[in-house]
Amino acid sequence: MSPPDAAADTGANAGADTGANAEDDTGANAGAGPARAPDGARSADRALVALARHSGGRTVAVLGCALAAAAAALAEPAVLGHTLDLLLRRDPSGTAWTLLCAAVITAEVALDAAAARLTGEVDGRSTARLRRLGLAGLLRTAPHHAARHAPGETAARLTAHATEAGKVPTAVAHAVAALLPPLGAVAALLLIDLWTALAFLLGVPLLLLLLRSFTRSTLTTVARYQQVQLATAGRLVEALAGARTIAAAGTADRERARILEQLPELDTEGRRMWKVYGGTTARSATLMPMLLYAVLAVGGIRLSAGAIGVGELLAAMRYAALAAGAGAVTGGLAAVVRGRAAARRTTALLALPAFEYGRAELPDGGPGTLELRGVRVVRGGSTVLRDISLVVPGGATVAVVGRSGAGKTLLAAVAGRLTDPDAGQVLLDGVPLRKLSAGALRREVGYAFDRPVLLGETVGDAIGFGPGPDPGPEAVRAAARAARADPFVRRLPHGYGTRLADAPMSGGEVQRLGLARAFCHAGRLLVLDDATSSLDTVTAREVERALAREVRSGTRIVVAHRLSSAVRADLVVWLEDGRVRATGAHGELWRHEPGYRAVFAADPAEPDRQAAPPDPAEGAARTPETDRSRTPAGNREVAP
């Protein structure tokens, strides 16, 4: 069973089949969003700290290089000024100081280059780690939790937003280093001449107000921009997934309008963001020259009075420029603000509740007896499965039937622990599924879905994809034969070695490969969630026969929409409104329960098969005990 299948099929179908869709969950969470916003910010900050630690040595090296470059920039005016004074006095030591100037400038350039190279490396490592953690968060959670995030939103979180968030550790390092030149320059101005320094300090309050306004305005604008960007990306991915339906319905213009509906708002927020940045830059461009002119005027007066020399005036001007250089600080703050906002969205994937596994193993040679004890599942505040208690004998094939929304797919998900019940227990051969190790669970519990996602490079890889070692080509071909996929696979250009990207397939062919994958890794429990829905009746019947004869024996849970699947099952579990209405043999339920017959009223299967006994060869797994009459709803036990 592959996690992407679980997310794409079980999560989606659980919403469709039970009425507890992902939008309900998202809505509930959205309603609680403001209350959890501080927690989200703290979680994002913790994740960013962890990113910095992940590349701790390199991040420290970035900070060290940036600080050293800033120190060189801070030393440069003093060295230049002193060198100028020496040269004007024709002092013999002027040559040595000239060489020192060249060395300081060279060191500054080299350190800036080293910081830039290390910054790119750390940003790449941090972004990659954040993406891996986000993807791991999606794959280790239950499908209904993953379904809270639409595919488009998830793609945006793992790409653009992860990139922005990954830059935060180095952005903080550069922002810290950017503080050294202004602060050091102010101190140097005070050492050179008090009156010149006071002329500059008069404008510092305006500079601080400018930075404060920029930070606050940017935070609000960036957060809203990213929120609208996520929504637009989600709509785009939805439209791409349903491109054929849109084309067939002739609604391309309507979909285009729906996707671009929030584009004006995105444009507004984007313009506002750049307006804030541009306004800050413009005000800085006005304030900085004024500060420099003030320093130049006072410095000129002090020079004429003989209080400072020409070199000191040059140094004072350079230090005033460094002290007024809020642009570097502003850019660093902007990167940190954008990164923190992006981190809050990306780390939402890390916060998804993860499955917890135990260390238990299943007993050797167990028959695959499945037991559900008082299982209850809640979705979106509504109880979807109520007090489900079943015992499925090992080796039996059980069909789960019911109208749409009865909870069939969710029951199948609970049976194989794609999701955990909110109350009750699920046991396999007497061992609670929660206590099983991840390896034991996925080795012995397999799934086949109605819309399988094929993973791997080639068709053979897709069939062999699963837990444990590579099953080998013979096992792959045997599974394909059982799923009736071998004939069409052999007709592909390179057979089982054909790349999936070069093998266009129909829905039925994809479904057969999904079945083959499940058969290839069949354990003591195999769950088929409407896994033959795209197959024609003849092929579906052949697959059902092969499942009984050619695949490793074990317990089968079949979510049945076809009458033929219920007919061939050893037992039937009839769900209605999240409860077990009745259990028993299909023939007995058909004869005594009009509501059961109504479940299949729209089924296109042959009417004459509705109560006909199956071929003895097909029902080899039946026993006199399991082929008994129906069990009343009050006693929901399927065991003999």
Image: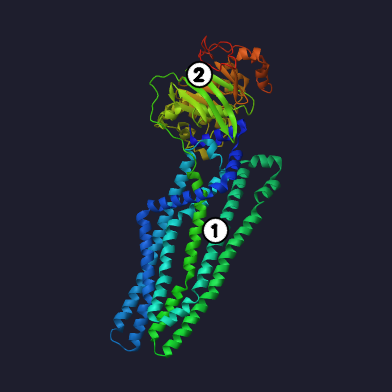
The answer to whether residue 431 shows anywhere in this view is: yes
In the rendered view, tell whether residue 553 sits above or below residue 32.
above
Q: Is residue 192 left or right of residue 12?
A: left
Residue 608's spot in the image, x, y percent? 66, 14
Specify the amino acid type for callout 2. Answer: Val
Circle 1: element type: helix
Residue 219 bears which disc, if any?
1
Residue 345 bears which disc, if any?
none
In the rendered view, tell whether residue 273 sits above or below residue 206.
above
In the rendered view, tell whether residue 149 sits above or below residue 538.
below
Specify the amino acid type for callout 1. Answer: Leu
Residue 482's spot in the image, x, y percent? 50, 23
Residue 348's spot in the image, x, y percent? 51, 46
Q: Is residue 536 left or right of residue 195?
A: right
Q: How is the model colour-coded?
A: rainbow
Callout 2: 10 Å neighbours few (<14), some, many (20+)?
some
Q: Residue at x 38, y 68 (%)?
A: 69
Q: Is residue 524 left or right of residue 153?
A: left
Query: Can you identify the residue that label 2 sits on?
Result: 391
Toward the top, the furthest residue is: 624
Circle 2: element type: strand
Callout 1: 10 Å neighbours few (<14), some, many (20+)?
some
Residue 321's spot in the image, x, y percent? 46, 76
The answer to whether residue 521 shows anywhere in this view is: no
Residues at marks 1 and 2, CA–CA distance in whole angstroms: 56 Å
The reply to whether dot 1 and dot 2 touch (C-beta < 8 Å) is no
Identify which residue, 403 or 524, lies in the foreground. Answer: 403
Identify which residue, 493 or 612, lies in the foreground. Answer: 612
